[in-house]
Image (cartoon, rainbow, N blue to C red):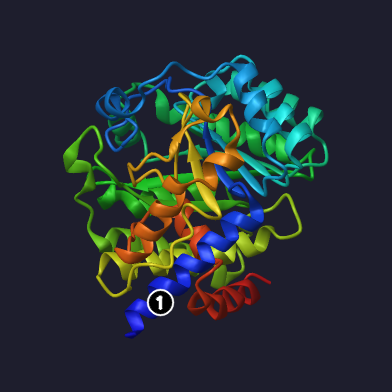
Amino acid sequence: MNSQTIKTELYTSLTNTLAHIFRTPQYIILFVTDVCWMRCQHCWFNEEWKARELTNSTLTFDEYEKLADSINQIKFLSLTGGEAFHRDDIVELATMFRHKTKLARYQIPTSGYKTERIVSATEDLLKANPDTPFRVDVSLDGVGEVHNEIRRISDGYERACTTIIELNKLKQHYSNFDVGVITTISHTNQDTVEEIGAVVEKIHPSGEWMINITRGNPRDPEATKVQLSAYKKAHEIIDRRIAEGSYQGHGGHQTAKWLSAKNAVRRQVISDIMEGKREGGGCAAGSIGGVIYSDGSVKVCEMLDKPLGNLRDFNYDLTALWNGEAARQVRRFIQETNCQCTQECFLSVSMLIQPDTWPDMIRERIRLG
């Protein structure tokens, strides 16, 4: 066998073994609604995608509860959408998963648009789950009108900034809470990275700034036309702050600094992918990480539209679905095709099984102090 065949067979065997051992994905992106407060230019989760891929009604609370009953443990749960804070019962939903699944950490990404609603629900979540690390990540995609243009809303920038500030105030009172800021670089904001970085440093000086790249098929096809130099510029800004000792990164739990170290290495991995320098394959989507949509459909990754099935057809038993024949076939497909993308979440879990990234993560962790 040649080296590529050996790699394919090794990672196919490894990912199938991990899926069997864990029974269900340990890193779950769970869509709890398909409703959003915005219509962002760069978003792949748009009307066209939803009309094509979401073919069933939204799961009820009772159905989410049945799903939770089939899961023994979750290391990391991202409650997303749409806008997860749009749900009136988001506190009860997250708390239910914490009670039933031995939940280690959870996170909610948000546009930050409705400050009072978000901050109130966040504090309720912290009170209901005092020992479970929790993070809220607020999107900030530009300064002033640039952010508003991307998000197609007139007052989104001011509201997002206010939400970041108010959440950071809350962070002072809860040791298990962390706040992140996410910027998705697109064609619209790529020339303003330094300005965004300056605002983030001003209103979010003691937390993580995460940099994403527009992916998939967004509402505005032009959004994907991103210069690599813009992405590298954001990395340089963060790297400079780390070198100066002014960058604290993630918090809220004992391993938080490792997440910041991982993010630093991941930015380099994404740069290498965009430049065609990194070989594909070795992806942990479908074994460690997975996606569950609001209609009950399950996929291995947001960027790979190969459904494994619908929870309703498996009596809400994620274990049975995750270890079924369709899942095994997709895991093999990923390795045989050297499947690779810049989806940050699945690069994160894949780095856990890619030994070439480990020395760099150790070095970055040392740099963070």
Q: Is residue 20 left or right of residue 186?
A: right
* Residue 72 percent coordinates (x, y): 72, 43
12 above or below 331? Answer: below
Q: Which residue is mark 1?
A: 7
* Residue 201 percent coordinates (x, y): 52, 51
35 above or below 172? Answer: above
Task: Name the one closer to the observer, 40 or 166.
Answer: 40
Disc 1 crowd rating (10 Å Cα; few below 14, some 14-19, many 20+) is some
Is residue 325 visible in the rendered image? The answer is: yes
Residue occupying the far front of the picture: 325
Residue occupying the far bottom of the picture: 2
Is residue 247 visible in the rendered image? The answer is: no
318 above or below 334? Answer: above
* Residue 243 percent coordinates (x, y): 55, 73
111 above or below 238? Answer: above
| Quadrant where the C terminus is found in the figure | bottom right
Q: Could you tell me which secondary element the residue under label 1 belongs to?
A: helix
* Residue 106 percent coordinates (x, y): 65, 41
| Quadrant where the N terminus is found in the figure | bottom left
Q: What residue sits 79% from the left and 45% below the top?
A: 175
Q: Amino acid at mark 1?
A: Lys
Q: What residue sits 20% from the left and 35% below the top?
A: 220
Q: What residue sits 82% from the left and 41% below the top?
A: 131
Task: Name the one closer to the observer, 193 or 345.
Answer: 345
Q: Is residue 334 left or right of residue 164?
A: left
Q: How many marks?
A: 1
